[in-house]
Amino acid sequence: MHANSSRKPHIDTLAVQAGRLEDAHGAVVTPIYQASTFDYPAGDRPLVYTRYGNNPTQIAVQERITALEGARAALILSSGMAALSTAILTVCQAGDHVVAAPELYGGTHRLLDNELPGWGIKVSYAADHGPEAWEAVIKPNTKLFLWEAITNPLVRVADGEALAGLARDRGVVSLVDATFATPINQRPAEFGVDLVMHSATKYLGGHADLIGGVLAGDDGLIERATRMLASLGGSADPHAVFLLERGIKTLALRMARHNENGRAISEYLASHPKIERVFYPTLADHPDRDVAARVLSGAGGVVAFIPRATPAEAQRIVERFEWIRLAPSLGGVESLVSMPAMTSHRHLTSDQRAQRGMPDQTVRLALGVEAAEDLIDDLDRALTS
Ligand SMILES: Cc1ncc(COP(=O)(O)O)c(C=O)c1O
């Protein structure tokens, strides 16, 4: 990467430097090419048009993401859902079949359950996170495996290595939504996943001020996804791409703090008498602790817990927080709290939520980068008053 070194640079350095656009004026920051169209190209240069994903601001940041993921190519899109729908339609056509993880982001479930059948694409859910359950539902027309690196809100951790291996053996494309992990905690392309997707709205952007999505992976697949993007039109605005790049520069710093906060606060909650159960992948009683130790280098900032309280009492607890704001989403510098029964899992009945291990009093923390001690004080006040 660097002219004088054969050593691969650290991801912290790539987050700041990779894909740097050499601007004619020497700007240190990637300029925002806020232009929809560009001069008709001379020679064999391709036509540049911002919907095609080849605006210079988009290209620069795509190169940075490619380097961070250890992938061959990357594409930035207008949202996480644009990235996901574009990826699925790149790989699948009418008559094809998808195998998906049992727990997925609610918007992903809606896309798979409400839209794909109308497009002639069938979906089966694996019964659990292990490869045997995936093998059991593969069909001859299975084209895609889809899972999340870390799920919401119970932070289950998929064995991405095993699933990618199974997909490869069976000629199936693997697609992982690695939003909760980020390339700091997991680089799925390095263990053979074909396509990595992120809601860049979350940790990559990092400041709750943009909506964006990312695909990274194999160059042939990204080339096909880029053509699909041009047809579907979910391209990212250059200004949002600029904000995304600004966020990515501090991704390694922020994730180190998110990881620290996740660990400290999950341990604090696990020892609290008013808490029945805490979910965080480094805790001893987490069902995927061993898998997490192998496939993640940090577990991120999402922690879920079940207080010894009724749902109404739990609601009053979350309303008592002073620093931690009651809002959905995650991945920004501010800590947020939400109750899955009212946000991500509101489409299920109480019984269905309980069956999935998240009774209605379950609380999800999306920890930011504040000092753990202050967040613990906030939790302590709310739990004891
Ligand atoms: C895991 C995951 N994937 C995808 C999405 C969708 O992303 P976006 O809101 O950027 O479309 C979200 C949003 O919450 C998410 O949490």
Image (cartoon, helix red, strand yellow):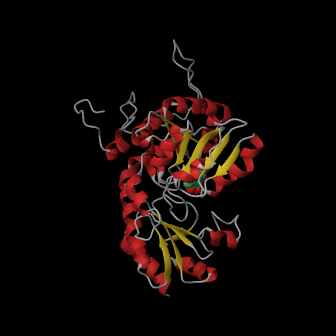
The x and y percentages for residue 40 are: 57, 18
Residue reaching furthest right? 118
Instruction: Name which residue lies at 55% across and 72% down.
Output: 363
The x and y percentages for residue 315 are: 60, 78
Residue 175 picture quarter: top right
Residue reaching furthest left? 4
The x and y percentages for residue 162 are: 47, 48
Seen in the image, is 23 located left or right of residue 201? left
Instruction: Name which residue lies at 55% across and 50% down.
Output: 147
Is residue 246 placed above or below 66 in the rendered structure? below
Q: Nearer the viewer, residue 70 or 102?
A: 102
Instruction: Name which residue lies at 60% across and 37% down.
Output: 235
Asked if residue 370 shows in the view, the reply is no
Seen in the image, is 138 located left or right of residue 75? right
Residue 119 picture quarter: top right
Q: Nearer the viewer, residue 239 or 69?
A: 69
Asked if residue 160 shows in the view, the reply is yes
The x and y percentages for residue 299 are: 42, 60
Is residue 335 placed above or below 169 in the rendered structure? below
Residue reaching furthest top? 43
